[in-house]
Image (cartoon, grey):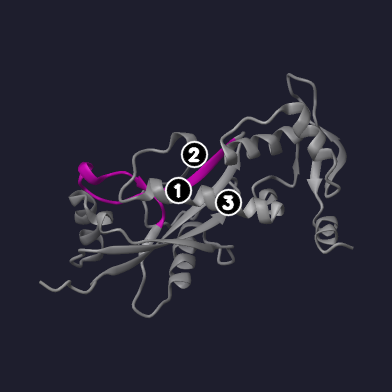
Amino acid sequence: MENAFLQTYVSVDCVVFGFDKGQLNVLLVQRNTPSSAVNGLKLPGSLIYQQEDADAGAYRVLNELTGIKKITLRQFKSFTSPARTANKDDVAWLETTYRNKIDRLITIAYLSLGKTNRKLNLVSKYKTVSWRPLSELPAMPFDHKQIVEEALNEIRSWVEMEPAILFELLPVKFTVADLRRLYEEIYHRKQDVRNFHKKIIRMEYIVPLEEKQENVSHRAARYYKFDRVIYNKRKIGL
């Protein structure tokens, strides 16, 4: 028997990371369904329309959630396993939502970094849109857990090539402890406090401010800021 050629639908799924209170978070949505058997949180995503490309589909998905049109998105991997549609409940939800018979589903995954204090779009088509700690992610449909894991690996690669990417997750002013916790969350390993502090203060583009924390129960820490001008000069060797 000859192998049948692939007949499939294509979707986009977006992994948006944010950092808040020492935790790395992922933006999840609640899929709308009357059946509790398939009710749950998932990555924001959609089948792509006939006349749009994958990039346009990903930007559409996040615009619907945030109301923001200018969002930095990077495509990082495609997920093509036939097992993506092995769960009958997942497929039933998908077919009900899109009113089509779906046997195979390939998804193109995108990665974005966002601020957790950014106001989310109140007219979203989803019941709930919320940030969830990476360490406490619920069971999710399809292979969304795997997509998040691959996205985290991608961020690690970005940091090795472009350390400035970290500061998209931090507020304008931050403490060394904030930056250390972010490293620990991304790499899943503890950093020695003293050695990390020595490493950071040697980085000229991390500039100390005169401000310190206020109304804290511990010794007030100094705030720092990321100076992109200094960073870019060092990057090009000026």
Inspect the image, locate mark 1, and give the three-letter code of the amino acid beneath it: Val
The answer to whether residue 205 is left or right of residue 135 is right
Alpha-carbon distance for marks 1 and 2? 9 Å
Q: Which residue is drawn at 84% across and 59% down?
A: 229
Q: Is mark 2 on a helix, strand or loop?
A: helix
Q: In this view, does 19 lie above or below 62?
A: above
Residue of label 3:
155
Residue that sits furthest to the front in the current view: 1
Residue 11 in percent (x, y) is at 36, 65
Identify the residue at horizontal 51%, vertical 52% (top origin).
16
Q: Mark 1 points at which residue?
A: 148
Across and down, in percent, residue 29 comes to 40, 49
Q: Which amino acid type is marked by label 2?
A: Leu
Asked if the residue under mark 2 is in contact with the one under mark 1, i.e. CB atoms within 8 Å, the reply is yes
Within-10-Å neighbours for mark 1: few <14, some 14–19, many 20+: many
Residue that label 2 marks: 134
Image quarter of residue 196: top right
Q: Which of the two discs, 3 and 2, labels the residue nearer the N terminus? A: 2
* 172 and 134: which is toward the camera: 134
Residue 228 placement (x, y as % from top left): 80, 57
